[in-house]
Image (cartoon, rainbow, N blue to C red):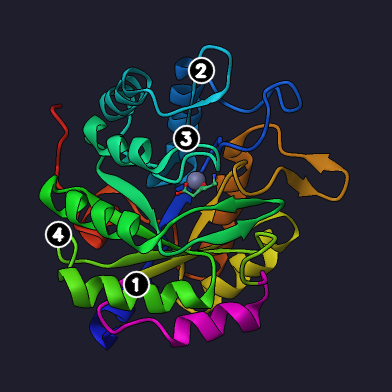
Amino acid sequence: MSSTSSAAAAASTLITVAPTGAELSKEDFPQLPSTLEELVETATACEAAGAAMIHLHIRDAEHRPTLDHGYLKAAVDALREQTSLVVQLSTGGSVHDPLEQRLTVLDAEPDSCSLTCGTTNFGDDVFLNPWGFMSDLYVQAQEREVVPEFELFDLGHVHALRRLIDTHGLPFGGKVHVDFVTNVPGGMPGSPAALMAAVQLLPPEVTSWAATGIGRAHLPVMAAALSAGGHLRVGMEDNVVFARGKQVQHNRELVERAAHLAQVMQRPAMSTDDARALLGVKDRRTR
Ligand code: KMH
Ligand code: ZN
């Protein structure tokens, strides 16, 4: 990363909230936002608490993960209308979603989309991201002026990002933002040492990086990222335990804690306008 962009990134902290994910069931976690109304309420509260971007997985009327265009478009439109958050749609979906359908996520015209840079074991499942899929998604995101966030679950994914940039040039907007998703069973550990090893190997084109730690790695990875100039992702997709014996009741609690820690570290939560500039997203807002 260039010294200029790392200085800018170090001044404030982009906090992304990933409120829902595709793995938890509404039955087990009734507080998981799964309806459009709950998503909008969550997004509004999380923006007020310091989030500047939302990473969205959408659920259907039975609270099951869906990539149905109608649901995705309704969520993008509602969040764009009712918040200033950068709206990022997951193209990872659930481990059961077919690759072709994951590409159709871009039809909902999000500001940003996730793009995972390689296949990874995902607990007992496999999260499939073959080169052809990554490559198609990268090019389609360029064509549709959607900014990808590169999800890196492993050191090999850092190398695959290098190959994407070499093959296809820079993403739309010219910025390269990555998010290390650590501590997935099958991916890189959620330790400061592993995170720093991966950060060291980032291609120079990378303009900003964030990190999240799944489950128990949530706080250590947050602290490590903050201390090293990185940005943060929090949310129930990644972690449902607020503290020992205390379940997260609302995503806002995780955003509030991240914003507090960022403030203590003299890198306060970034505004949504600054996040848009950092990520190079196209302004699709109508209001
Ligand atoms: N749900 C995981 C299989 C992404 O959003 O792009 C994939 C995931 C990554 O959550
Ligand atoms: Zn996700």
Task: Residue under label 1, please give it.
Answer: 161
Asked which secondary structure carries label 1, the reply is helix
Mark 1 or mark 2: whose residue is earlier in sequence: 2
In the rendering, which numbered label is found on residue 261? none
193 magenta-colored? yes
Highlighted range, magenta: 189-207
Q: Which mark is residue 173?
A: 4
Residue 35, numbered label: 2
Q: Is residue 4 magenta?
A: no
- Closest to the camera, between mark 4 and mark 3, is 3
Callout 3: CB less than 8 Å from ligand 2 = yes
State which quadrant residue 267 falls in.
Answer: bottom left
* Secondary structure under the numbered disc 4 in the rendered image: loop
- Marks 4 and 3: CB-CB under 8 Å? no
Please tell me which residue is depicted at 54% across the width and 71% down the height of the picture.
154
Q: Position of residue 140 (x, y in %)?
A: 18, 49
Residue drawn 59% across and 43% down?
237
- Residue in the foreground of this view, choosing between 28 and 8: 28
Q: Quadrant of residue 101?
A: top left
Foreground residue, 31 or 151? Answer: 151
- The residue sitting at 62% across, 59% down in the picture is 121
Quarter where residue 81 is shown: top left
Q: Quadrant of the N terminus?
A: bottom left
Q: Amino acid at mark 1?
A: Leu
* Residue at x 47%, y 16% (from the top left corner): 37
